[in-house]
Image (spheres, rainbow, N blue to C red):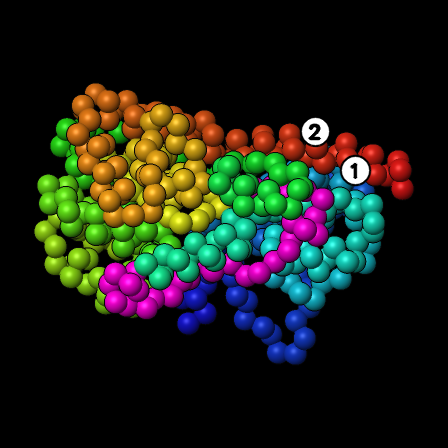
Amino acid sequence: MLRLVNRLLRIIGLELRRPAAGAMPSRVVSLRPDGEPAGNVLISYIPDDVLKAEAEVSASHTHYWECRHMAHSFRDAGYNVDVIDFADSEFVPDKSYEVLVSARTNLERLAKHVPAHCLKIAHLDTAHFLTNNANATERLRQVRDKHRVALRSTRMVEANWALEAADMGCVLGNAFTADTYEFAGKPIYRIPLSSVRRFDWQADKDFDACRKTFLWFGSGGFVHKGLDLVIDAFAELPDYRLLICGPLDLEPRFVRAFDDALYHRDNIETIGWTNVTSPEFAEIRRRAIAMVYPSCSEGGGGSTITCMHAGLIPVVSAQASVDVGDFGTVIDDLSVDAVRDAVQALGEQPVTTLEQRARAAWEFARQHHTRETFAANYDQFVADVVLPEVRRRRASA
């Protein structure tokens, strides 16, 4: 059961740990610089793979490698680095930290235990909880009223006041995510989300044959990510085909509500969860022209970025929080009509245009959403923003 729950929670960057008997001690993973340390940095995020060789880091979620690099970036800048789990509610700092980086609820708690001069950075891996939860609730209400079924969301974000307790924040998404935090009046810096996979370009892909085949690709939170809208849109597009890749077993209520569309409609093929490294996914991306993803709130749009790496044109909502330039399509609003119109408009474009747009999406992902680009952006953030501010605070302390 714990494993099943964690498959859902990892979608939003959470994970449950099974407590040991008695009090559970805090786990601290530490890195030390080669020379005399310039100070101490505390990161509250995902410590699991910080000490692993890069090739051994888990590819199940981007945050494992990203946290590892964040820690190594500060270590390489000359700092002692301690990393704890962002869900660790027991750890109390016992040393003077120059920088605190934390996700979610732990920042507000830890901020009370670090020195006044400590620079506090909120690592914002979702949209603001009020935006996310309001959008998710509204989508569930729409499904209730249209399909006469009350579902629940696996994508609710816990209330937190991380940015209010911080001096600045970092977002992994684009302007959509950043704008949900604008109210706090704190500086927000963008570190574009990395990707766990890259793919070669499929030079032999038949763009004429696949022009009317689209993919919905996502993990749990089907209503949140607009699968119901996509299903209803394709009901009005009998000449178009929809492939669905997601862990259907995790949301049985949704499956029961949409059983007829998922399993008994000629133009919808429900595949289920698919490993992106598998031969099956290689065939799926060969068959499809685009991925369609009308999400109501994201912190970085990882599934969209994966599909762009796979050479699929993104047809997404603004709330998917991924820049799609001229090669992608931004769905006008979260409605069946808007999804239908966006899909149909793309499918009617010339084959040469479709190939050009798919190639541009693939190239954009390789240029902006890789581990290398995340590393370069985070290293620059540390060098140009964090360290000068640390020195200024130290001088004025």
Percent position (x, y) of residue 151?
A: 34, 66
Q: Which amino acid does label 2 sit on?
A: Asp
Residue numbers of the magenta segment = 143-171
User: Who is closer to the viewer here, 205 or 318?
Assistant: 318
Query: Is residue 126 in view from this perspective?
Result: no
Instruction: Mark 1 or mark 2: name the one nearer the start of the chain.
Output: 2
Crowd rating for badge 2 (residues with CA inside 10 Å; few <14, some 14–19, many 20+): few
* Residue 378 at x, y percent in the picture: 61, 35
Residue located at (30% from left, 64% from top): 144
**Quadrant of the image occupied by residue 71:** top right
> Residue 345: percent from the left, percent from the top?
21, 32
Q: Is residue 309 above or below residue 9?
A: above
Q: In the visual, does 11 lie left or right of 128? A: left
The quarter of the rendered structure image containing the N terminus is: bottom left
Where does the image place residue 72, in percent across and percent down from the top left? Answer: 65, 40
The furthest residue to the bottom: 22
Question: Which residue carries the number 1 mark?
Answer: 390
| Amino acid at the residue labelled 1 | Val
On-image quarter of the C terminus: top right
- Quadrant for residue 359, please give it: top left
In this view, which residue lies farthest toward the front?
Answer: 145
Q: Is residue 152 covered in magenta?
A: yes
At 72% across and 57% down in the image, what residue appears? 110
Q: What element carries label 2?
A: helix
Examine the rendered structure and indicate whether residue 210 appears above or below residue 149. Answer: above
Q: Residue 384 carries which label?
A: 2
